[in-house]
Image: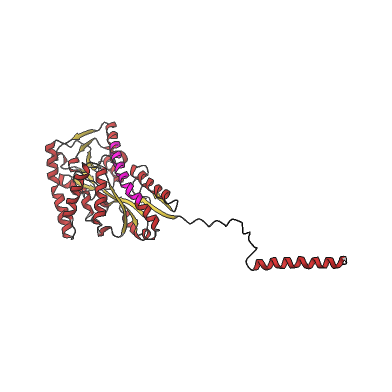
Amino acid sequence: MSRGAKSWTLALVIGAVVSFALAGCEKGGPVQDANAPAAAAPAAKAIELSYSVFFPPTHIQAVTADAWAKEVEKRTNGKVKITMYAGGTLTNPQQCYEGVVNGISDIGMSCFAYTQGRFPLLEGLDLPLGYPNGTVATRVATELTQRYQPKEVSDVRVLYVHAHGPGLLASKKPVRTLEDVKGLKIRSTGLSQKIVTALGGTPVAMPQGDTYESLSKGVVDATLCPIETLKGWKQGEVINCVTDATAVGYTTAMFVVMNKAKWDKLPADVQKTIAEVNAEWVAKHGQAWDQADADGREFVKSLNREMISLTSEEQQRWKDAVKPVLEAYVAAAKAKGLPGEEFLKDAQDLIAKYSK
């Protein structure tokens, strides 16, 4: 074969190969190596949730809430990512619940008491029943909310409830008897306002965030609060005395709730994981309240504030004074067709049970 013929034949072969390759590309690309590893599937996008908390970020309850969020992220292997908004930066304390209902935040933590009249049955959690500590108050609050599942919280998914230790009276001047309470302007919220009235004081409604300045400026003379507040919100700096009123110790129940539609869209395995973490965090919040109370007591002592204990006779006087608050709750619940009497009895029974 001549050199020219050979060149022509070689050209035809090369052209055929190129044409075949191009045709392969048009029909789906080059042939893959059967032994080559398969391409990794793209990672699923994390479920992003926002969490509005009214406590300042350094408060032990905000820290405990953040630990809950991190635990959920960990146990879902990163399927869920929760962004915290502490200090009421996303929704203020009074708007937090409705903010969850309306989807401003996916999850929210605040006090039932900050929206008076919105939770008529669960108001019973805050009654002056002599709660001994935050662990008992938290267990009682969560258990009763789960047991009754009241319609008033049916527009959200209740994750759990926690509650502080017994509310005490921190004041500018000593309070040793009911007579000393008369005429005092006392910061309180929700049902605790009725407690103040029953004890003979004048209730002044305001959230915790406004209390320090109000005490320092004399807008109020005292505050009805758990002792942890005196450190957590620095209010111990602007009071002089603390009266141990555990005999009529009330609590303030705090919800942790999630937007219902958002919850329903979560995969079943994620819902299960969150429920498991919730059950563990009830105890953790209760313990956090008790630790905060212990820290608050030490903080007050370090400031040399006077700690006042009521005599047994005076304790009974205070108990008798607040009985109308319990009776009024039962009557108001009954008028709304709610089982207030049963709820109150269950609360008292659970306090006795868990206090042992």
- For the point 29% across and 45% down, the residue is 208
Residue 70 seen in the current view = yes
46 vs 8: above or below = above
Q: In which quarter of the image is residue 314?
A: top left
In this picture, residue 6 sits left or right of residue 216: right
Q: Position of residue 188 (x, y in %)?
A: 23, 46
Q: Which colour scheme is used?
A: secondary structure
Residue 233 seen in the current view = no
- For the point 68% across and 68% down, the residue is 23
Residue interval drawn in magenta? 276-295
Q: Where is residue 284 in the image (x, y as percent from the top left)?
A: 32, 44
Closer to the camera, 28 or 137? Answer: 28
Q: Main secondary structure of the magenta part?
A: helix
- For the point 29% across and 34% down, the residue is 299
Q: Residue furthest right?
A: 2
In this picture, residue 126 sits left or right of residue 274: left
Image quarter where the N terminus lies is bottom right
Q: In which quarter of the image is residue 352?
A: top left
Is 280 inside the magenta-drawn segment? Answer: yes
In this picture, residue 140 sits left or right of residue 312: right
Q: Where is residue 174 in the image (x, y as percent from the top left)?
A: 19, 35
Is 123 inside the magenta-drawn segment? Answer: no
Q: Where is residue 168 in the image (x, y as percent from the top left)?
A: 22, 41
